[in-house]
Amino acid sequence: MFKRLQQKWGISGAQFWVIFVAFGLTGITTAFITRYITGWIGLTKETFWLWKVLLRITMLVFGYQVVLLSYGALLGQWAFFWKYEKLLLQKLGMMPSEKTESSFKTVNMAIFASGAGSNAANIIRYFKNRPDTKIGLIVCNKPEAGVLGIADKNGVPTLLIEKDRFAKGDAYLPELQKTGIDFVVLAGFLWKVPAALIAGYPNKIINIHPALLPKYGGKGMYGSKVHEAVIAAGEKESGITIHFVNEHYDEGATIFQASCSIDHADTPETLAAKIHDLEYAHFPKQIDELLAKHVGK
Ligand code: GAR
């Protein structure tokens, strides 16, 4: 958790602990000042409760922030805490938003899927309650795909796409941009990604493939077809590959691979289950790490 915060805020380990100490000192100091003011203005046990609550709220909203900035400055972390305060003021509507607060930015991710959507469901579950990452759209090309029900259940908007416009037209870029999508994850999406989409999201589209690329990739190699080919070839292991997407099927740079063994009793179905387990264990984590490194959350 500490490491994730560190990555999200873009700070070093030492800086993280200084910031941690500043928050702690601020809590203690604010409590002390509140008690002092309570005595100074003569609030006692008998005083009407509302006045005491109002004092606490005032101290929390204003006093705490001033003390925090002071400790931040004293400990050499003014830039960090000022950024933090500005974000808070913007959230409270007391300051206009700036688009430059990139280290606290929420990444808005689209998942492209055309199948059952178990990976999409797993990614949604992983990033639930994460203020830094949002699943803003599910893109699908099959009206009957299970992933649409998953999107609906999780309140994620969907976009149903049609082949000609996707492959030969604008690749639905206007819709993606209008939704504020800044990262694309293919999770069981079988169409080739057109140049228009790659140009719109350079190095920001990744795919998961259910085999150890470069083996068993390319056009027509998807889902159970991959597992059937792997078993038929008598392979002793298979696995998953997470990779950047370029204009050729399954050829973009590899980000991560994990493998599993295959024994003589395995069938395409049992292998598919092993592969799905690997996907669930690694895909969301790899997305998380990649976003922290390259998209600048
Ligand atoms: C996944 O195993 C994924 O690796 C594969 O489709 C499956 C989708 O399952 N993708 C490909 O074959 C891409 N060439 P899901 O719909 O349950 O997530």
Image: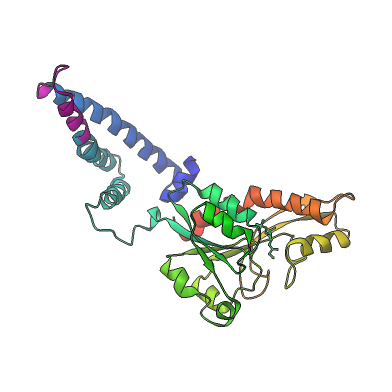
261 vs 100: above or below: above
Residues drawn in magenta: 40-57
Q: Residue at x 18, y 32 (%)?
A: 54
Q: Residue at x 59, y 55 (%)?
A: 120
Q: Nearer the viewer, residue 34 or 29?
A: 34
Residue closest to the far front? 144
Q: Is residue 163 visible?
A: yes
Q: Is residue 259 visible?
A: no
In this picture, residue 155 sits left or right of residue 162: left
In this picture, residue 65 sits left or right of residue 271: left
Residue closest to the far top? 45
Q: Residue at x 47, y 53 (%)?
A: 133
Could you say where residue 40 lies in the image, as x and y percent from the top left? 10, 23
57 vs 38: above or below: below
Membership of 207 in magenta stretch: no
Residue 95 sits in quarter? bottom left
Q: Residue at x 45, y 74 (%)?
A: 174
Could you say where residue 240 lies in the image, as x and y percent from the top left? 71, 57
Could you say where residue 216 lies in the image, as x and y percent from the top left? 77, 66
Q: Nearer the viewer, residue 78 or 82?
A: 82
Membership of 44 in magenta stretch: yes
Quadrant of the displayed image that contains ligand 1: bottom right
75 vs 184: above or below: above
